[in-house]
Image (cartoon, rainbow, N blue to C red):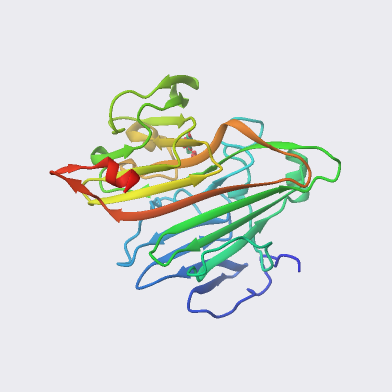
């Protein structure tokens, strides 16, 4: 069966785990519901997660109060950067996927799932005629967004080369995840210390991270290379740790615009940089190449857990390996 068009009725109309929200133009959002007040909201425009709430109904992702409505990219949540990350190519910044209307995929190819996960949705993006003029490659991009029993969120991307002319294609990719934090000056990132990174603020020059956990005192825009599969964002004030897991995505981008850049951004409040941090599992340094018929899979897993303490200190080992 073909994927439903954005305007066709949702395939499953009622389920305690899924809610479809329509707007005048057609289907607008899907809400996944978990235990107690856990939820995830996904916007069809951009195939973008725009909210992830824990069982107390607290928002875990940052969304700017100045976020602009479609057709502009939406500042916050989890934009998908594809087929280009940043300015690394001829396309618009971060590629076009975050700026397209995705459809519900009502008959996705099988994907092994945890049977305990009841709340999930499958989306699909295929290139339009205009997209093919800009990026002349035929593809199917399937995205499954799932809310686990414990309130954890996972995004699984499957990208297939459907070119019929025998040509491979290459792309870069990121899950541009905006985390909500209490105060950026009190946040530490564990798992990236000692890693090599490309500094976007210094012409992509390569450096090696020194010292302990990463803390934030000014603008940061770095691509950590061959980053570990698990990274922790420890929010001291909230006593909350985000655990970010990644598969199929070698790199991790870390970004905070800080005060000067924040003021220059039209869709971002002047002081909002204090309450957000982007940690973005990505494939940036080495583009991924697919031959016709080949499929790539890249997964992001997010959970929010109470921070572990050991003798009054945050214990990174418990967070990363516990
Ligand atoms: O403003 P956007 O196009 O959404 O990009 C926001 C940011 O995304 C990434 O984190 C890049 O590394 C940054 O260089 C960029 O400024």
**Is 165 drawn above or below residue 12 in the view shown?**
above
Image position of 15 (left or right of 135): left
- The residue furthest right is 165
Q: Is residue 8 visible?
A: yes
**Is 83 drawn above or below residue 33 in the view shown?**
above
In the depicted view, which residue is nearer to us: 243 or 41?
Answer: 243
Q: Position of residue 68 (x, y in %)?
A: 49, 51
Q: Is residue 86 visible?
A: no
Q: Position of residue 228 (x, y in %)?
A: 44, 37
Total numbered circles: 0
Residue drawn at (41%, 27%), measured in percent from left and top? 195
- The residue furthest left is 311
Residue 142, picture quadrant: bottom right
**Is 3 drawn above or below residue 218 in the view shown?**
below
Image position of 68 (left or right of 157): left
Residue 191, picture quadrant: top left
Q: Position of residue 202 (x, y in %)?
A: 45, 20
Residue drawn at (41%, 59%), measured in percent from left and top? 152
Image position of 63 (left or right of 95): left
Residue 266, picture quadrant: top left
Q: Quadrant of the N terminus?
A: bottom right
Q: Position of residue 281 (x, y in %)?
A: 49, 42
């Amino acid at each position: 069966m073909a994927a439903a068009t954005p305007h066709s009725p949702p395939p499953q109309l009622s389920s305690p785990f899924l809610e479809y929200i329509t707007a005048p133009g057609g289907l607008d959002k899907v809400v996944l519901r978990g235990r107690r007040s856990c939820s995830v909201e996904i916007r069809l425009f951009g195939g973008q997660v725009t909210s992830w709430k824990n069982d107390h109904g607290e928002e875990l992702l940052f969304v700017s109060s100045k976020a602009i409505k479609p057709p502009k990219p939406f500042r916050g949540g989890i934009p998908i950067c594809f087929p280009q990350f940043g300015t690394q190519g001829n396309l618009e910044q971060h590629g076009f996927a975050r700026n397209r209307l995705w459809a519900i995929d009502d008959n996705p190819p099988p994907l092994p799932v945890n049977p305990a996960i009841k709340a999930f949705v499958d989306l699909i993006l295929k290139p339009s005629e205009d997209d093919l003029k800009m990026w002349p490659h035929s593809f199917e991009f399937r995205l499954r967004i799932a809310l686990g029993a414990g309130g954890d969120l996972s995004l699984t991307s499957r990208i297939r080369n459907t070119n019929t002319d025998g040509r491979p294609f290459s792309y870069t990719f990121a899950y541009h995840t905006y985390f909500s934090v209490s105060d950026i000056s009190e946040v530490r990132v564990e798992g990236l210390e000692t890693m090599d990174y490309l500094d976007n603020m210094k012409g992509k020059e390569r450096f090696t991270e020194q010292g302990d956990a990463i803390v934030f005192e000014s603008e940061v825009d770095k691509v950590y290379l061959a980053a570990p599969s698990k990274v922790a964002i420890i929010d001291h004030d909230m006593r909350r740790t985000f655990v970010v897991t990644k598969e199929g995505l070698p790199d991790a981008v870390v970004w905070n615009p800080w005060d000067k850049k924040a003021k220059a951004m039209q869709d971002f409040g002047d002081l909002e940089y204090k309450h957000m941090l982007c940690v973005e599992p990505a494939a940036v340094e080495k583009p991924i190449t697919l031959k016709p018929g080949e499929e790539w899979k890249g997964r992001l897993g997010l959970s929010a857990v109470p921070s572990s303490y050991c003798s009054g200190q945050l214990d990174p080992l418990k967070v990363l390996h516990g």
